[in-house]
Image (tube, rainbow, N blue to C red):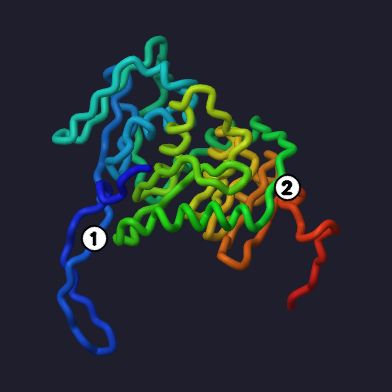
Amino acid sequence: MQDLLQGVQPATRFHVRQSQWSEEKTQVVDETTVALMVNGAHYVTVALTPIDLQAWVVGFLAGEGVVRQPQDLTIFRWYPEEGQLWVRVPGYRRDPNSHARYLGSCCGQSRPAFLERAEKVLVPSEIAITPQQLQRGFAALNAWSQTQRSGGLHVAGLADMSGQLVLTSADVGRHNALDKVFGQGLCRPEFSFSDHIVLFSGRLSAEIIAKVARMGCAIVASNAAPTSLGIKLAGQLGITAVAFLRQEELSIFSHVERVQCPGDGVWEMKERG
């Protein structure tokens, strides 16, 4: 797993607790702007945490439809002093009408075409999982995230169907964290996304659901909230969206049939006012 201490920087804070002031050493998440250059041209500038960058490039460009596999990248160069990543993708020709753009760490791509492409992706799957397995996987992801104390890193992971954590990634931006874990999986020969679940620390927005669909994963679970468009898209794409995941509870917003109910019977639904 990635050493998360590489993704934070030391800082000093003046802290108030019960009217008492104290000066303390702490950690803050490392956020920097990186310009991605594809075939010598500026493709995008992204605010991210500069760890696991090769996995981010692979996952991000796969989500963009620029590459399909890591082997499509023949050159990868990182120049930290200039804040530039240079990659070469033989055969790629950018749309002359498109322009380089800036992606903040808190936002996704915010382009209609992104969701339009996502609507063509359907994730059929017969897999099933229990609430306990989801909670086990997220507890492992949370324990890993606590190896640093910045409080500012989003984390993402892939777990197998037993809830065993397989891959992890982190970044100041939730989209970047998911791109990184996507790239890690693509870099593993014959890795199967379809029999793994996505564990995620951010909101389940429509763009996050679209990324999960492109990965080919049928279940995504987060400790955060979903959005209305995220729920709608998850239903359309065949994705089970689990939110508000806690040690003792969780909420399922789409395709509940993949989460096995307690015991051998049918889910017992109780109205709560």
Which residue type carries mark 2?
Arg
Left or right of 243 on screen, residue 72: left
Q: Determine the residue located farthest toward the right in the rendered image.
A: 265
Point 37% across, 18% down: residue: 73
Point 31% across, 49% down: residue: 4
Callout 1 crowding tier (Cα within 10 Å): few <14, some 14–19, many ≥20: some
**Residue 31 can be seen, yes or no:** no
Point 56% across, 60% down: residue: 225
Specify the label residue 258 is tagged with. Answer: 2
Left or right of 251 on screen, residue 59: left
Q: Number of callouts in the render?
A: 2
- N-terminal-most mark, 1 or 2: 1
- 209 and 127: which is toward the camera: 127
Which residue type carries mark 1?
Gln
- 54 and 134: which is toward the camera: 134
**Residue 25 can be seen, yes or no:** yes
Q: Is residue 236 above or below residue 201?
A: above
Specify the label residue 146 is tagged with. Answer: none
Left or right of 75 on screen, residue 132: right
Specify the label residue 27 is tagged with. Answer: 1
SS class, disc 2? helix
Where is residue 260 shown, x and y percent of the image?
74, 53
